[in-house]
Structures are given as structure tokens and as C-alpha cells.
Image (cartoon, rainbow, N blue to C red):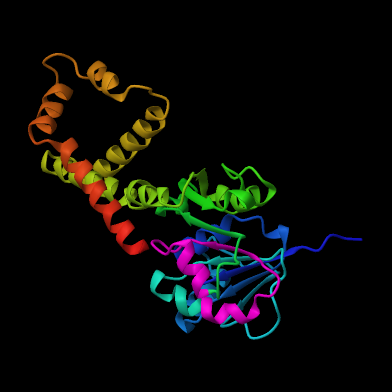
Amino acid sequence: MAKTKRNFYFIGFGNMAQAIYERMDKGAYENIFIVEKSDQRIKEIREMSEGWYDFRLSPQTKIIKKISKGKFSSIDIILLAVKPAQIKSVCVQLKPLIEQEPFIVSIAAGVNSQKIRQYLGGYTVHKFARTMPNLCAKKAMAITGLFGDPYWFGKKGGTSQGKLVSKIFSPIGQVLWVGQESDLDTVTAISGSGPAYIYYIMNAMIDAAEELGLERSDAQRLVAQTIIGAGETGKDIYNLEEEIIKVSSKGGTTEKAIDVFKQKKLDVIIKQAVKAAHKRSKELSK
């Protein structure tokens, strides 16, 4: 007897959900439902699929405005991809449809598992994973923090259920299972918000290069590739402080720049910024 395939439900279809959809193994699912209330967004999705964009809806994909009938199977996957403010109303609508417990995965920042379980009618939802991807998913270069009940998903996502959830996010980059849900506040402050920090620094470097005479397009290419290269090599450097010293020749250009960073206490500013983001993430989770 053929094994029944899962259904996959996108509840909301913003940029992150679209990035996941584009790279997912669509053949692993019998049906893929994009549940999207916005008429404008539905129009955009169809236009992208029918136009010259590098985006196509698969044959088993259906766009619907709401789930009006049927019940979820215990092997189905529901991806909550709406804005945090919409999570409660979405869960209330889903609650009557949940008899057998499906896999529920949330990418809504700041909405903790306790709240989502409450919105779904109690604390019986065990197959629930909370995740924190980032904008680099657009280029399949994200890193996604994941947390779920260790009984179901394993300490580092090592169970079959954990691997199932990892498989959703690994096509958009790397995955990192954390030991406790509160760790996702740190993930949010570092990698969730992190691209904006890097863009801020990039923009300042590009502006400086322009002021020194480079064309902006050349400056952007120079800065972007420098950051990509430093990130790639930095992954394997055990002591970054020692590496900075190696690059900073006595009396050289790098030393002069690092001296300014130290005088202005750039390291303190960055730590303060990350901690402010972490504090806000914890506030939103309450």
C-alpha cells in the first residue's frame, strides 16, 4: 500500500514563506495549500507565477482564502507565517479543525509556544516548533534558530520529527536547534535582526567610499564581497581578536581604523545594541 503523503499549509505567504516555498521539496507533499486572505497578495502570487519571475506554483499547490472544510491529519504540517499580531485570530480559526494533532511550526517573532498553545485551546499541542529565520533566506543563506519539545524533536532536532522540521528550513540556509525557548530571544537579537545591523555598517562603508571618490555601484560591490569573504573565513577562526592583530600591521592602514573603533568604543555600542534587541524580544514574548 502506498504511503500517504503529507499536506503542507502556509498560513500567510509573505517574503519568508515565499522563500521557503521556492526551495522546498514540493514532491514530498500530496497538496500544498497557500492560505492567504489578501486579494492583492493572491494577485501578486499568481502574476509572479505566470510572468517572467523565477517563481512557479507547482501543480499540487492551491491558493485558498481560508480553510473552510476538512480536518488536519496527524502527519500534516502547518506553517504559521502571519504577522505576530495576527497569530491569535489565526489560531482561533484553526482550533476547530484540529482533531488529530498536526505538526505546527511558527515563524512569528516574539510569540512564544505557551501563547500559541493557549490560542489553540490548551496545552495539548506537543508537535509544535518555534523558529527564527532571517532575511538571508532570499539567497538561501539564512541561519534559522529552532526550538521544540525535546521529547518530540530531540535535544538538537535529532528525532525523525526534528529532522522533518529541519528539512523545511535547511533549503534556505543552515539550521541551529537551541536548548531552551528563551535562547530564541538571543537568536532574534543576533541573526534575526542581524542583517539590518550589517546593512547599516555596509551603508556607512559605501558612503565613505563614495566620499573618497568611488562610484556607488563599485563601492557596494567592494563592501558586499568584503563582508561575504570575512564571514566565510571568520567561521573557522577560533580567536578573532588575534586575527585582527595579524591583519593590523604596525603603523598601517588597518591599525589606524581599529584605533578609531577603540576610541569610539564601537564594541560597546554593538553590544548595547544587541542587548537592546534581546530585551525587546523578551518583552514581546511575554
In percent of width and height, residue 164 lies at 65, 52
Q: Is residue 103 in view? A: yes
In the foreground, 208 or 120: 120
Q: Does the magenta stretch include residue 110?
A: yes
Quarter of image, res 122: bottom right
View extreme (top): residue: 250
Q: In this view, does 8 lie above or below 252?
A: below
Q: Which residue lies furthest to the left in this view?
A: 263
Q: Is residue 242 found left or right of 115 in the rendered image? A: left
Residue 267 sits in quarter: top left
Q: In this view, does 183 lie above or below 45?
A: above
Left/right of residue 22 with respect to residue 180 in the rendered view: right
- Identify the residue shown where x is 28% and y is 18%: 242
Q: Tell whether position 79 is magenta.
A: no
Q: Where is residue 71 in the image (x, y as percent from the top left)?
A: 70, 78
Q: In this view, does 202 lie to the left or right of 171?
A: left
Confirm whether residue 13 shows in the render.
no
Q: Which residue is drawn at 56% across and 83% down?
A: 65
Q: Where is residue 186 in the image (x, y as percent from the top left)?
A: 36, 47
Decide which of 65, 227 is in the foreground and name it.
65
Classify the position of the N terminus by image quarter. Answer: bottom right
Of residues 44 and 130, which is closer to you in this image? 130
In the image, the segment drawn in magenta is: 91-119
